[in-house]
Amino acid sequence: MDLALLRTFVTVHRAGSFTRAAALLGLSQPAVTSQIRSLERQLGRPLFLRCARGVTPTTFGDELAHKVAPHLDALTEITEAGLDRESVTRTLHLAGPPEFMARRALPALAPLIPQGLSLRTAFGSADELLTGLAAGHHDLTVTTTRPRGGLLTATALCDEEHVLIAAPSWSAQFGGPDALQAGGVRVLDSVPLVEVHESLPMIARYWAEVFDAKPAASAAVITADLRAVLACVTAGAGLAVLPRYLCAEALACGEVVALLDPPVPPLRTYFLAVRTGTLGLPHIARAHEWLLRSAVDW
């Protein structure tokens, strides 16, 4: 039986869609459909059922995938491992949020560069990065969204604590943490908001979890990079919610202050996602393990 047909079949099974499988394989969608039909004719059994969103495997298709996939992955690992030994360097395509990549992921992987690893990075939203990972554009993706389905595999990397911050002048103006605890969230209504998006993702989540409320105003400043948010807050533009790792230095030197110290601060989990089966490739596995070990100290 043609191994190319089986590889296409396993890719469709993992992707749950002929279109997504075609992107992963570098084929057209009609070519993938034709290969699956050819395999179905050879086996004399249907492998997939079409549904509103892609395809679902038949019972026979599911059983075949679980039997075939490990062997195909093993062949890929053997092939790629051979290439790895023949090449002086291997390129890792790493994607994630720009701030986290700059402060955490890239410095953590720096020791691997003298050992022959080459890095190429991409930034974007969680949805964009996971789509790119599934399509084969990235090898590893750091994301705050846990992917679903069998195509991608995710491992919890670390948690980040969110902190409500402002310049000291704003804290003094409304009376600081004591006034906020006594008067409630409405004490902050006069303070401009600084955020990364009009939907106020960081602030709205903090307000919901800590104050059980919604922000009363829209943002005064929108800037797509959290580092720019910190710069605006430090300069006195207003308040923001930021990951502690990003504003720890500014807090320590007094450029900004924490407006509240809740008993249970909001947390967000980062995941390290890969395409299922690719951890058999040595350079991806090494970087994956290195990031997980580094994250213990984050």
Image (spheres, grey):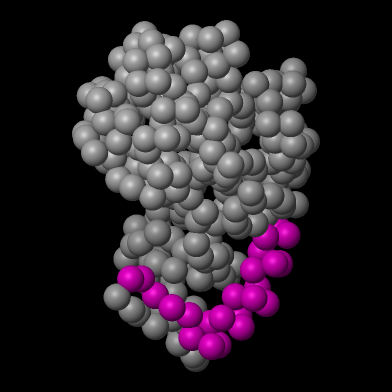
Between residue 133 and residue 6, name the one nearer to us: 133
> Vertically, is 234 above or below 152?
above
In the image, taking residue 156 as reference, residue 41 lies left or right, namely left
| Residue under the point 64% across and 76% down | 66
| Residue under the point 34% across and 15% down | 173
| Residue under the point 52% across and 54% down | 146
Between residue 48 and residue 141, name the one nearer to us: 141
| Residue under the point 58% across and 37% down | 160
- Asked whether 71 falls inside the magenta stretch, the response is yes
On the rendered image, what quadrant is the N terminus found in? bottom right
Q: Which residues are magenta?
A: 53-75
Q: Is residue 241 visible?
A: no
Q: Quadrant of residue 33?
A: bottom left
Q: Quadrant of residue 238?
A: top left
Residue 72 position, x and y percent, is: 66, 64
Between residue 190 and residue 130, name the one nearer to us: 190
> Vertically, is 280 above or below 100?
below
In the image, taking residue 70 as reference, residue 230 lies left or right, namely left
